[in-house]
Image (cartoon, grey):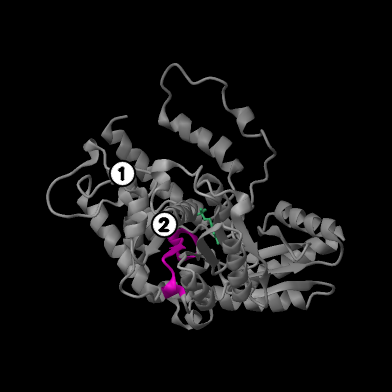
């Protein structure tokens, strides 16, 4: 493809993109395809001769688009959002075009320096103390794995990487039973093992772990000769939004000199609103590592996950490796690939720069505040529907409910709603029962979109009950 053609097609795609976003409400939110539908339309073998872009794009429309679930649809209420505010999409176009691999300061100084400043901006926006630094990772899963590896290394006197773990005894990590599966997987791949991830039941109206139960579990392990290595807390768990009492948990960890990590992948975005911090964020400043995903609620195009570190030294001592070909000379600089597991890095900070400047913190705060208010209003509406029950009250903009009937009925209603296509939500489990789970967080959603959930749920329920 020559650059004239490139110009023509990229202009075409800019128009296509705006049109797509403006007409999203006309599409079903969740793809209405069956397994294998799309693959059946793709040739078994690659073409031997070149095909032109017009044909490729035609196939994209005909074959690919019907098989997409529309995460930017204003009535997407499933999982958590993966927002892509328009300014962050523009930044990504530039990143894709310049296509730099930003592993070292030297391989694109601007990428490193913008990243450092964006971490500073977000630290300020979240009300964290000045002494936190940080790094942008691809996902909360990667940030959590980095923290778990750091726990492992700190607990073994930074000998695990070199000697392996076979002679180290049983390292133990503690969290609540409300954590995301990325915490389990981090413990699997870090060599800790699922059986050494100690899960304390979440209790109370925020489903947090009890600090004295945590303390007791650590003491039992110490008495048994195990090696406590770290504590992982959550603000805004994936299931029902569980939140730990951060101050109390950090205090227990400190008593035992344990490294601490806080998973605020979703709810972290809401902490740009100072009024939520008293209830959700007190004690966050006591954690060694904190992860939050601007690519969820905040609006930065996927992927963009910030890991804040109170003192980056322990993580650098865990992950930094410097073969000859990665050595650079000159002034002391930050090489962010030393902070993370992958070497190669995209220029993820640019979309934050575009996003935050385009909306200002005020514009981003206004969206999050609306979402929280609308979620509460919707929960009230659903509570008033005959036979419906709110199973967990809104925590920020996440709540769950049940329709009349057994667990199978809950799943039937979820499936029927998603087949209907006007809204998209998912099922979950809580206290041994199936629940219907819903969050409000899509960047362009309106109050009307949110209230549509009650209408659609009622209509679909009448049709299937
Ligand atoms: C989304 C989420 C994760 C996983 O995030 P990835 O960036 O997809 O790895 C982890 N924890 C919580 C609480 C989440 O909401």
Q: Position of residue 258 (x, y in %)?
A: 47, 65
Q: Position of residue 329 (x, y in %)?
A: 14, 46
Q: Is residue 170 magenta?
A: no
Q: Look at the picture and state if 356 lies above or below 31.
A: below
Q: Look at the picture and state if 155 lies above or below 50.
A: below
Q: If you read the primary sequence from the N terminus, does the residue marked by circle 2 or circle 1 appear first?
A: 2
| SS label for mark 2 | helix
Taking depth in this image into account, of 205 and 83 the one nearest to the observer is: 205
Taking depth in this image into account, of 111 and 421 the one nearest to the observer is: 111
Kindly tell me whether mark 2's CB lies below 8 Å from ligand 1: no
Taking depth in this image into account, of 207 and 160 the one nearest to the observer is: 160
Give the residue pinned by disc 2.
154
Residue 105 appears in view: yes
| SS label for mark 1 | loop
Give the residue pinned by disc 1.
321
Nearer mark to the viewer, of 2 and 1:
2
Image quarter in which the C terminus is found: bottom right
Q: Residues within 10 Å of mark 1 (few under 14, many from 20)?
A: some
Taking depth in this image into account, of 311 and 168 the one nearest to the observer is: 168
Residue 303 appears in view: no
Q: Position of residue 356 (x, y in %)?
A: 35, 67
* Residue at figure coordinates x 56%, y 23% from the top left: 43
> Tag count in the figure?
2
Identity of the residue furthest to the left in this view? 330
Q: Position of residue 273 (x, y in %)?
A: 45, 78
CA gap, disc 2 and disc 1:
17 Å
Residue 66, quarter of picture: top right
Q: Is residue 290 magenta?
A: yes
* Residue at figure coordinates x 34%, y 68% from the top left: 132
**Magenta stretch, residue numbers:** 284-300
């Amino acid at each position: 493809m020559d650059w004239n053609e490139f110009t023509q097609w990229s202009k075409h795609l800019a128009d296509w993109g705006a049109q797509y976003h403006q007409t999203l409400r006309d599409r079903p939110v969740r793809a209405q395809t069956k397994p294998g539908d799309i693959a059946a339309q793709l040739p078994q073998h690659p073409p031997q001769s070149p095909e032109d872009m017009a044909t490729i794009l035609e196939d994209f429309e005909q074959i690919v688009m019907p098989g997409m679930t529309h995460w930017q649809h204003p009535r997407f209420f499933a999982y958590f959002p993966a927002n892509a505010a328009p300014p962050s999409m523009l930044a990504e176009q530039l990143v894709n075009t310049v296509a730099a691999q930003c592993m070292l300061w030297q391989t694109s100084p601007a990428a490193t320096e913008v990243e450092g400043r964006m971490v500073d901006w977000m630290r300020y926006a979240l009300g964290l103390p000045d002494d936190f630094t940080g790094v942008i990772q691809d996902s909360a899963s990667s940030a959590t794995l980095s923290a778990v590896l750091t726990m492992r290394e700190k607990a073994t006197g930074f000998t695990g990487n070199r000697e392996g773990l076979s002679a180290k005894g049983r390292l133990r990590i503690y969290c609540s039973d409300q954590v995301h599966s990325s915490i389990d997987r981090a413990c699997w791949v870090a060599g800790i093992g699922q059986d050494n991830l100690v899960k304390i039941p979440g209790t109370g109206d925020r489903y947090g772990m009890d600090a004295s139960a945590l303390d007791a579990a650590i003491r039992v392990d110490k008495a048994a000769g195990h090696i406590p290595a770290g504590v992982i807390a959550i603000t805004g768990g994936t299931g029902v939004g569980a939140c730990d009492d951060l101050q109390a948990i950090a205090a227990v960890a400190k008593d035992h000199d344990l490294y601490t990590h806080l998973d605020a992948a979703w709810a972290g975005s809401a902490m740009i609103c100072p009024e939520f911090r008293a209830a959700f964020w007190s004690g966050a400043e006591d954690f060694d590592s904190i992860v939050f995903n601007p690519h969820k609620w905040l609006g930065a195009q996927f992927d963009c996950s910030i890991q804040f570190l109170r003192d980056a030294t322990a993580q650098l001592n865990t992950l930094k490796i410097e073969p000859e070909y990665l050595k650079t000379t000159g002034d002391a600089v930050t090489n962010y690939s030393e902070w993370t597991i992958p070497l190669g890095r995209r220029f993820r900070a640019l979309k934050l720069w575009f996003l935050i400047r385009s909306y200002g913190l005020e514009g981003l705060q206004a969206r999050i505040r609306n979402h929280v208010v609308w979620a509460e209003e919707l929960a009230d509406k659903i509570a008033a529907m005959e036979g419906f029950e709110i199973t967990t009250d809104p925590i920020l903009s996440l709540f769950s409910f049940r329709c009349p009937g057994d667990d199978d009925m809950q799943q039937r209603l979820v499936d029927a709603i998603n087949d209907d296509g006007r809204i998209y939500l998912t099922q979950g489990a809580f206290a041994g029962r199936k629940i219907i789970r819903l969050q409000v967080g899509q960047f362009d959603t309106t109050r009307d979109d949110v209230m549509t959930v009650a209408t659609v749920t009622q209509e679909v329920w009448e049709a299937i009950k």
